[in-house]
Image (cartoon, coloured by chain):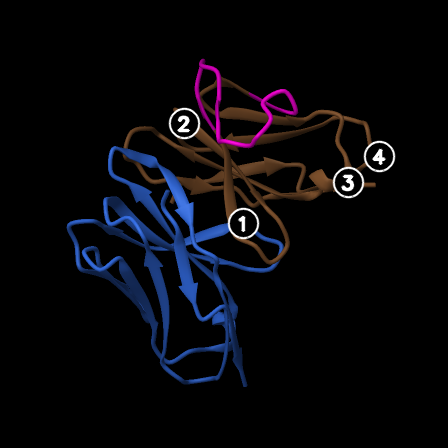
Amino acid sequence: KQEVTQIPAALSVPEGENLVLNCSFTDSAIYNLQWFRQDPGKGLTSLLLIQSSQREQTSGRLNASLDKSSGRSTLYIAASQPGDSATYLCAVSRAGTASKLTFGTGTRLQVTL
Amino acid sequence: GAVVSQHPSWVICKSGTSVKIECRSLDFQATTMFWYRQFPKQSLMLMATSNEGSKATYEQGVEKDKFLINHASLTLSTLTVTSAHPEDSSFYICSASSGGYNEQFFGPGTRLTVL
């Protein structure tokens, strides 16, 4: 059974800092990995999707990397802003059943002024 | 990206009543829809997968008679929580996909509180 873990569980940084969020998964037979953002009491916003054959994806100040063989992904946020404060979730889909997502435990990020 | 809506956004009901939550794909045909549950400060847990015109497939531990799922059209799926109890209070999120290996798009969620 796939298990997805995110470290740290919570993080508080001053505005402007670069930061890294970590995601690890136990079964490397994945189809893709996604990073999502969730604001309190809201649904999910997809940030980046990395196919299993890719090593990284970039969107603006966000960069996500994937090391499938070691079961790890990182989300790098450059020049953090207070508006980045949210919970960040990673999720993996299994090869062969690509439609089913297994979510990580999430990292609650707070960017302070 | 594609848009998925949920209705209602929040609902409060008495214990023993049934509550229906709708999930709609607004600008694409959703062959497959998913229902998730999220308890406070926890991650999303998949409850069931439904394909249009077929019976839903429930995850282990999810009672199919308690959580009724209907996916009668390519743009609408409903989740009915029957005989709701306080322990059913949670945040319910749906997602929709045009099928196969295509990306899931998530709705804004429905907050259910059972008194």
Provide the letter of the chain coloured brown: B
For discs 2 and 4, the disc positioned in front in the rendered view: 4
Q: Position of residue B16 (x, y in %)?
A: 81, 28
* Of the pair A90 and B22, the residue shown nearer to us: A90
Q: Main secondary structure of the magenta part?
A: loop
Please name the residue shown 23% across and 44% down the image.
Answer: A29
Q: Please indicate whether residue B2 sits to the left or right of residue B67 in the image.
A: left
Q: Is residue B33 magenta?
A: no
- Which of the numbered marks, if any, corresponds to residue A33? none
| Label 2 and label 3 in one chain | yes
Q: Do marks 2 and 4 share a subunit?
A: yes
Most foreground residue, A51 or B7: A51
Specify the amino acid type for callout 2: Thr
Residue A64, image quadrant: bottom left
The residues colored magenta run B49-69
Q: Give the structural element (helix, strand or loop) at label 3.
A: helix
Q: Colour of chain A?
A: blue
What's the distance in space between the residues labelled 2 and 4, CA to CA?
31 Å
Tell me the number on the disc at residue B86. Answer: 3
Number of the front mark, 2 or 3: 3
Find residue A42 and report its horizontal and vertical position in percent: 58, 53
Q: Nearer the viewer, mark 4 or mark 1?
A: 4
Q: Chain of mark 4?
A: B
* Whether labels 1 and 2 share one chain: no
Circles 2 and 4: CB distance less than 8 Å?
no
Residue pointed to by mark 4: B14
**Residue at numbered disc 2:** B32
Q: Amino acid at mark 1?
A: Gly
Residue A50 lies left or right of residue B55; in this view the side is left
Q: State the mark number for residue A43.
A: 1
> Separation of disc 3 and disc 4 at Cα?
9 Å
Disc 2 is placed on an element classified as strand
